[in-house]
């Protein structure tokens, strides 16, 4: 709940000792759901609690920029056998 409320997640030595990670979801407006995430990770010696908020804001901004780039129409492959089969 805390992560959802603030818009970013924090993992301190959860996956690897001595590593901290901060992440935010990429949520395009037209989709309304997360399609991926942006994260930054590094050693706890370089990313201490005093840097969490600043880095979180940068990650949120990057996630927002990527969400704005998300295509307005679904991606279609040049060669899509299923689409060709439906056209027959």
Image (tube, rainbow, N blue to C red):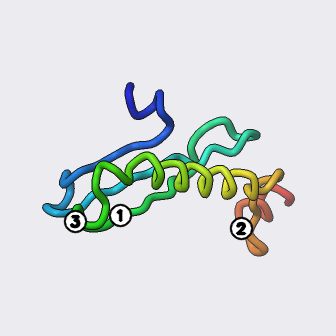
Give the residue pinned by disc 1: 41
Q: Nearer the viewer, residue 9 or 77?
A: 9
Q: Residue at x 40, y 34 (%)?
A: 3
Q: Nearer the viewer, residue 81 or 19?
A: 19
Q: Residue at x 38, y 49 (%)?
A: 52
State the separation of the CA atoms marked 2 and 1. 40 Å
Earlier in the chain: of badge 2 and badge 1, it is 1
Q: Find numbered disc 1 in the image and state the secondary structure of the residue it sits on.
A: strand
Q: Residue at x 66, y 50 (%)?
A: 64
Quadrant position of the N terminus in the picture: top left
The reply to whether discs 3 and 2 touch (Cβ–Cβ < 8 Å) is: no
- Front: mark 2 or 1: 1
Q: Find numbered disc 3 in the image and state the secondary structure of the residue it sits on.
A: loop
Q: Provide residue 45's location: percent of width, then percent of height.
A: 22, 65
Badge 1 crowding class, 10 Å Cα cut-off, few under 14, some 14 to 19, many 20 or more, is: some
Give the residue pinned by disc 2: 81
Give the residue pinned by disc 3: 45
Q: Provide residue 86's location: percent of width, then percent of height.
A: 80, 55
Earlier in the chain: of badge 3 and badge 2, it is 3
Q: Find numbered disc 2 in the image and state the secondary structure of the residue it sits on.
A: helix
State the separation of the CA atoms marked 3 and 2. 51 Å
Q: Residue at x 74, y 69 (%)?
A: 77
Badge 2 crowding class, 10 Å Cα cut-off, few under 14, some 14 to 19, many 20 or more, is: few
The reply to whether discs 2 and 1 touch (Cβ–Cβ < 8 Å) is: no
């Amino acid at each position: 709940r805390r992560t959802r409320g603030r818009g970013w997640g924090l993992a301190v030595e959860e996956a690897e000792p001595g590593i901290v990670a901060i992440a935010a979801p990429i949520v395009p407006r037209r989709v309304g759901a997360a399609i991926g995430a942006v994260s930054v990770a590094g050693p706890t010696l370089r990313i201490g609690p005093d840097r969490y908020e600043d880095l979180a804001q940068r990650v949120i901004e990057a996630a927002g920029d990527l969400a704005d780039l998300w295509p307005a129409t679904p991606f279609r492959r040049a060669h899509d056998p299923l689409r060709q089969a439906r056209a027959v």
